[in-house]
Image: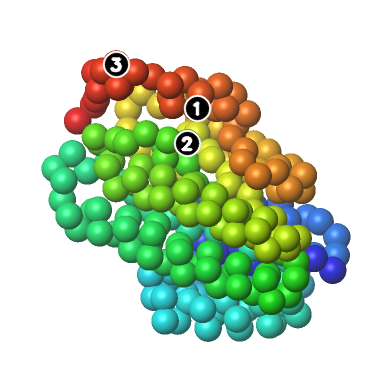
Amino acid sequence: MKRIVIVGATSGIGEGLARLYAEQEEVRVGLMGRRRECLERLAAFRPSVFETEVCDVTDTELLERKLECLSGRLGGLDLLILSSGTGDLNPALDYAVERSALLTNVVGWTCAVDWAVRFFERQGHGHLVVITSAGGLRGSGAAPAYNATKAFQMNYVEGIRQRLAGRRLPVRVTDIRPGFVDTAMAKGDGLFWVASVEKACRQMMRAIERRRSVVYVTRRWRAVAWVYRHLPDGLYMKMAKV
């Protein structure tokens, strides 16, 4: 029996992955999110597979207790997928918008990652998957906090991967970096190569099963990422849409 917890399962990629995993045999899935009605609706899809816990990741005092409770109800934990995240275009540099991204994508996100790593280290095995973003490769004038927090996540899990390698533990970390996926997070004009949630989630699942370290979704975004990283600063600055 494979035990999975998905944090941020109420919509988008988190919900898509939950539905795909529910189709597998010998699996139990714990769903966590802040919207009770969305969790209950998803749990009704496979009541014998799903367990739910309502929690906002920004409530870090409650988050660790809820994760412990949910993994206990599953009878253990083999895979934790951290899909929660937020971000908005912010041309006015409204700090309230940036603060929301920081609290969710840095503070709450880090709390969940640290809990998972400690759990897997004690257990001696496990797999942590984080959904970051190709946007984390460069800064964004239109959404400064979103891209910056995704860069933080990429660097943080690289540090976690190095920590685990030094301890020679069989705990895997997968950093999934989507391009544009057709969710509420895809904002702005002129978006290209927008993948459906189902297509993106199926590629993510394959990467998770292969225990990849870093993967771009959809696959063509690996080439885009290379170009994005190597664009001269002067040219990149001219691409601003603020």
Left or right, 239 with respect to 11, comes to left
Who's the residue at 48% across and 76% down the image?
63
Q: Is residue 135 visible?
A: yes
Residue drawn at the location 65% of the way across and 44% of the way down:
213
Q: Earlier in the sequence, mark 2 or mark 3?
A: 2
128 to the left or right of 92: right
Q: Which residue is mark 2?
A: 134
Quarter of the C terminus within the rendering: top left
Q: Quadrant of residue 81?
A: bottom right
Instruction: Give the camera-side residue of 33 and 221.
Output: 221
Q: Amino acid at mark 1?
A: Ala
Q: Is residue 170 above or below residue 62?
A: above
On residue 225, the disc is: 1
- Residues at marks 2 and 3, CA–CA distance in whole angstroms: 19 Å
Which residue does the image show at 34% across and 45% down from the upper left? Answer: 148
Q: Are marks 1 and 3 in contact (CB under 8 Å)?
A: no
Q: Nearer the viewer, residue 178 or 110?
A: 110
> What kind of residue is marked 3?
Leu
Between marks 1 and 3, how big is the CA–CA gap?
16 Å
Q: Position of residue 22 (x, y in %)?
A: 74, 59
Q: Which residue in the structure is indicated by mark 3?
A: 235
Neighbour class for label 1 at 10 Å: few (<14), some, many (≥20)? some
Q: Which residue occupies 71% across, 71% down?
A: 77
